[in-house]
Image: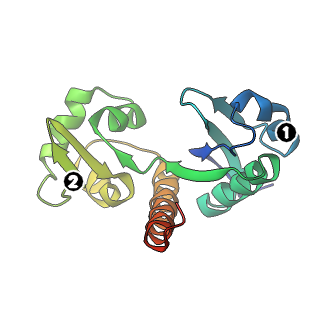
């Protein structure tokens, strides 16, 4: 399709209790349309799928991937969408430069873009909120598609957290 762009993102799912082995889902994921994803199985009872999905926008890309995964893994629960919260190392990878360069560039915007976490020598930001500052006030170059996905990821993760809090308050966890 013309007008499509490629969006890179990761969906992380908690697997259903009756089928905790991620390997059990690989064929179903492929058959459900996740042939553009690389599965990762490092965390027990979870599967991470790194997508390179073509779509007209990031919201459509993430929504279609989520639909495909949930068709393949009945009872799977989306627990995180990435990229959202990033540190200097992740920014360096996205900008294809050194972590030291990122840290130097971030000094220029530190007051303008306060981090969501800063303790124990680690600082983390919502990537989507850094967009306006990084592109205007630093020499770091990150693809517009990455920023677009990060906005979708931040909203999705906020909804996931909201649902979790609702479950905790209603006693269903």
Mark 2, residue position: 115
Residue at 45% across, 62% down: 161
* Within-10-Å neighbours for mark 2: few <14, some 14–19, many 20+: some
In the drawing, what numbered circle is on residue 28? 1
Q: Can residue 8 be seen in this view?
A: no
- Mark 1 and 2 residues: CB-CB less than 8 Å, in contact? no
Residue 81: mark in rendering: none
Q: Where is residue 48 in the image (x, y as percent from the top left)?
A: 60, 37
| Left or right position of 97 against 159 | left
Query: Vertically, is 97 above or below 95?
Result: above
Drawn side of residue 75 relative to residue 10, left or right: right
**Mark positioned earlier in the residue sequence (1 or 2):** 1
Q: In which quarter of the image is residue 38?
A: top right
- At 73% from the left edge and 53% from the top edge, which residue is drawn? 75
Along the viewing direction, whichever of 81 and 72 lies nearer the viewer: 72
Please state which of residues 59 and 160 is positioned toward the viewer in this rendering: 160
Badge 1, how many Cα within 10 Å: few under 14, some, many 20+? Answer: some
As measured in the structure, the alpha-carbon distance from the residue carrying label 1 to the one carrying label 2 is: 39 Å
Instruction: Report x, y in % for residue 160.
Output: 51, 62
| Relative to 93, residue 119 above or below | below
Q: Is residue 108 above or below residue 160?
A: above
Q: Where is residue 151 in the image (x, y as percent from the top left)?
A: 46, 61
Label 2: element kind: loop
Q: Which quadrant of the rendered structure holds the N terminus?
A: bottom right
Residue at 70 percent across and 32 percent down: it is 22
């Amino acid at each position: 399709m013309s007008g499509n762009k490629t969006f890179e993102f990761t969906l992380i799912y908690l697997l259903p209790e009756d089928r905790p082995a991620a390997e059990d889902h690989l064929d179903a994921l492929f058959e459900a349309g996740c042939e553009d994803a690389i599965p990762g199985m490092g965390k027990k009872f979870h599967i991470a799928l790194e997508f390179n999905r073509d779509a007209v926008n990031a919201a459509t890309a993430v929504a279609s991937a989520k639909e495909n995964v949930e068709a393949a893994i009945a009872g799977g629960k989306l627990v995180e969408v990435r990229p959202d919260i990033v540190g200097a190392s992740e920014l360096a990878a996205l900008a294809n430069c050194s972590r030291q360069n990122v840290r130097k560039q971030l000094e220029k915007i530190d007051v303008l873009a306060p981090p969501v976490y800063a303790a124990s020598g680690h600082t983390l930001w919502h990537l989507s909120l850094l967009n306006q500052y990084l592109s205007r006030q630093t020499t770091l170059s990150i693809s517009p598609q990455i920023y677009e996905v990060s906005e979708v990821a931040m909203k999705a993760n906020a909804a996931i957290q909201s649902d979790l809090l609702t479950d905790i308050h209603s006693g269903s966890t």
